[in-house]
Protein backbone atom coordinates (compact mmCIF):
# COMPACT_ATOMS: atom_id res chain seq x y z
CA UNK A 1 0.00 0.00 0.00
CA UNK A 2 2.83 2.40 0.76
CA UNK A 3 4.23 1.99 -2.77
CA UNK A 4 1.23 3.86 -4.14
CA UNK A 5 1.93 6.91 -2.02
CA UNK A 6 5.51 7.05 -3.27
CA UNK A 7 4.12 7.60 -6.77
CA UNK A 8 2.79 11.06 -5.84
CA UNK A 9 4.91 13.77 -7.51
CA UNK A 10 6.75 16.29 -5.37
CA UNK A 11 4.67 19.27 -6.56
CA UNK A 12 1.45 17.48 -5.57
CA UNK A 13 2.87 16.45 -2.19
CA UNK A 14 3.85 20.06 -1.48
CA UNK A 15 0.40 21.37 -2.44
CA UNK A 16 -1.36 18.68 -0.40
CA UNK A 17 0.86 19.49 2.58
CA UNK A 18 0.12 23.20 2.21
CA UNK A 19 -3.65 22.72 2.15
CA UNK A 20 -3.54 20.24 5.03
CA UNK A 21 -1.52 22.66 7.13
CA UNK A 22 -3.79 25.56 6.19
CA UNK A 23 -6.95 23.63 7.04
CA UNK A 24 -5.46 22.30 10.26
CA UNK A 25 -4.26 25.76 11.32
CA UNK A 26 -7.70 27.29 10.72
CA UNK A 27 -9.34 24.48 12.67
CA UNK A 28 -6.86 25.01 15.50
CA UNK A 29 -7.55 28.75 15.50
CA UNK A 30 -11.27 28.01 15.78
CA UNK A 31 -10.69 25.59 18.67
CA UNK A 32 -8.42 27.99 20.55
CA UNK A 33 -10.87 30.83 20.01
CA UNK A 34 -13.64 28.64 21.36
CA UNK A 35 -11.64 28.11 24.54
CA UNK A 36 -10.57 31.74 24.96
CA UNK A 37 -13.93 33.44 24.48
CA UNK A 38 -15.98 33.96 27.62
CA UNK A 39 -19.65 34.17 26.69
CA UNK A 40 -21.81 31.91 24.57
CA UNK A 41 -22.35 34.64 22.00
CA UNK A 42 -18.62 35.21 21.52
CA UNK A 43 -17.94 31.48 21.33
CA UNK A 44 -20.51 30.84 18.65
CA UNK A 45 -18.40 32.46 15.90
CA UNK A 46 -15.19 30.51 16.33
CA UNK A 47 -16.32 26.98 15.38
CA UNK A 48 -17.70 28.37 12.14
CA UNK A 49 -14.21 29.44 11.11
CA UNK A 50 -12.71 26.09 12.01
CA UNK A 51 -15.32 23.92 10.38
CA UNK A 52 -15.96 25.97 7.25
CA UNK A 53 -12.52 27.13 6.17
CA UNK A 54 -10.57 24.45 8.03
CA UNK A 55 -12.60 21.65 6.49
CA UNK A 56 -12.31 23.39 3.13
CA UNK A 57 -8.52 23.22 3.22
CA UNK A 58 -8.56 19.56 4.20
CA UNK A 59 -11.12 18.72 1.51
CA UNK A 60 -9.03 20.46 -1.17
CA UNK A 61 -5.95 18.53 -0.02
CA UNK A 62 -7.87 15.25 -0.18
CA UNK A 63 -9.24 16.00 -3.64
CA UNK A 64 -5.81 16.91 -4.95
CA UNK A 65 -4.07 13.91 -3.40
CA UNK A 66 -6.51 11.28 -4.61
CA UNK A 67 -6.88 12.90 -8.02
CA UNK A 68 -3.14 12.73 -8.58
CA UNK A 69 -2.90 9.23 -7.12
CA UNK A 70 -5.70 7.77 -9.25
CA UNK A 71 -4.89 9.92 -12.36
CA UNK A 72 -8.54 11.00 -12.68
CA UNK A 73 -10.52 13.79 -11.06
CA UNK A 74 -11.89 12.82 -7.66
CA UNK A 75 -14.65 15.27 -6.87
CA UNK A 76 -16.95 13.54 -4.37
CA UNK A 77 -15.23 15.42 -1.53
CA UNK A 78 -16.94 18.55 -2.84
CA UNK A 79 -20.19 17.19 -1.39
CA UNK A 80 -18.56 16.80 2.02
CA UNK A 81 -17.21 20.34 1.91
CA UNK A 82 -20.53 21.70 0.68
CA UNK A 83 -22.54 20.04 3.45
CA UNK A 84 -20.09 21.14 6.16
CA UNK A 85 -19.95 24.69 4.81
CA UNK A 86 -23.72 25.00 4.61
CA UNK A 87 -24.81 23.20 7.76
CA UNK A 88 -22.38 24.61 10.32
CA UNK A 89 -23.22 28.33 9.97
CA UNK A 90 -26.94 27.59 9.75
CA UNK A 91 -26.79 25.45 12.89
CA UNK A 92 -24.86 28.10 14.79
CA UNK A 93 -27.31 30.81 13.69
CA UNK A 94 -30.17 28.68 15.00
CA UNK A 95 -28.34 28.12 18.29
CA UNK A 96 -27.70 31.86 18.60
CA UNK A 97 -31.34 32.67 17.89
CA UNK A 98 -32.47 30.14 20.50
CA UNK A 99 -30.07 31.64 23.06
CA UNK A 100 -31.34 35.16 22.37
CA UNK A 101 -34.92 33.95 22.75
CA UNK A 102 -34.03 32.22 26.02
CA UNK A 103 -32.34 35.35 27.34
CA UNK A 104 -35.35 37.48 26.42
CA UNK A 105 -37.74 35.06 28.12
CA UNK A 106 -35.61 35.13 31.27
CA UNK A 107 -35.50 38.93 31.19
CA UNK A 108 -31.74 39.18 30.68
CA UNK A 109 -30.21 42.01 28.68
CA UNK A 110 -29.01 41.22 25.21
CA UNK A 111 -25.42 39.96 25.21
CA UNK A 112 -24.04 42.95 23.31
CA UNK A 113 -24.79 45.02 26.39
CA UNK A 114 -22.64 42.93 28.78
CA UNK A 115 -19.87 45.52 28.74
CA UNK A 116 -22.01 47.95 30.71
CA UNK A 117 -22.12 50.59 27.98
CA UNK A 118 -25.76 50.92 27.00
CA UNK A 119 -26.51 52.52 23.65
CA UNK A 120 -29.32 55.07 23.52
CA UNK A 121 -32.68 53.40 23.01
CA UNK A 122 -35.01 54.75 20.39
CA UNK A 123 -38.49 54.06 21.81
CA UNK A 124 -40.34 53.46 18.51
CA UNK A 125 -37.63 51.04 17.36
CA UNK A 126 -37.54 49.36 20.76
CA UNK A 127 -41.32 48.88 20.64
CA UNK A 128 -40.98 47.02 17.35
CA UNK A 129 -38.33 44.68 18.77
CA UNK A 130 -40.23 43.91 21.98
CA UNK A 131 -42.63 41.03 21.97
CA UNK A 132 -46.18 41.47 23.33
Image (spheres, rainbow, N blue to C red):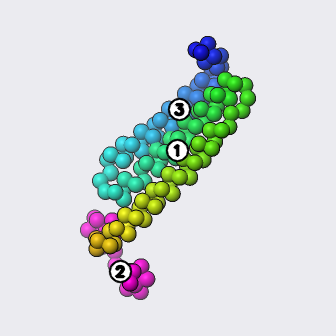
Which quadrant does the C terminus fall into? bottom left
Q: Is residue 25 above or below residue 125?
A: above
Residue 48 in percent (x, y) is at: 47, 50
Q: Does residue 112 appear in this view?
A: no
- Whole-Å distance between the Cαs marked 1 and 2? 37 Å
- Farthest top residue in view: 3
Q: Secondary structure at mark 3?
A: helix
Q: At 58% across and 37% down in the image, what residue appears?
A: 59
Residue 26's spot in the image, x, y percent? Answer: 47, 41
**Which of marks 1 and 3 precedes in the sequence?**
3
Which of marks 2 and 3 precedes in the sequence? 3
Residue shown at 34% from the left, 78% from the top: 120
Q: Residue furthest toward the bottom?
A: 124
Name the disc covering residue 20, or none.
3
Q: Which residue is mark 1?
A: 53
> Can residue 3 be seen in this snapshot?
yes
Q: Front-most of 24 and 97?
A: 97
Q: Residues within 10 Å of mark 2 (few under 14, many from 20)?
A: few
Dot 1 or dot 2, earlier in sequence: 1
Q: Which quarter shows the N terminus?
A: top right
Q: Quadrant of residue 77?
A: top right
Distance between mark 3 and mark 1 Cα atoms: 11 Å
Q: CA distance from mark 3 to mark 2?
A: 48 Å
> Percent position (x, y) of residue 46?
42, 50
The furthest residue to the right: 72
Q: Contact, CB < 8 Å: mark 3 with mark 2?
A: no
Residue stretch rendered in magenta on the structure? 109-132
The residue that label 2 is drawn on is 121
Secondary structure state at the residue bearing disc 2: loop
Amino acid sequence: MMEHYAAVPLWAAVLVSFFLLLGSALTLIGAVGLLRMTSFYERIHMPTLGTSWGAGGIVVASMLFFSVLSTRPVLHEILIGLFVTVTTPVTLMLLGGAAVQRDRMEGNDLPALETGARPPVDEPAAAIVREP
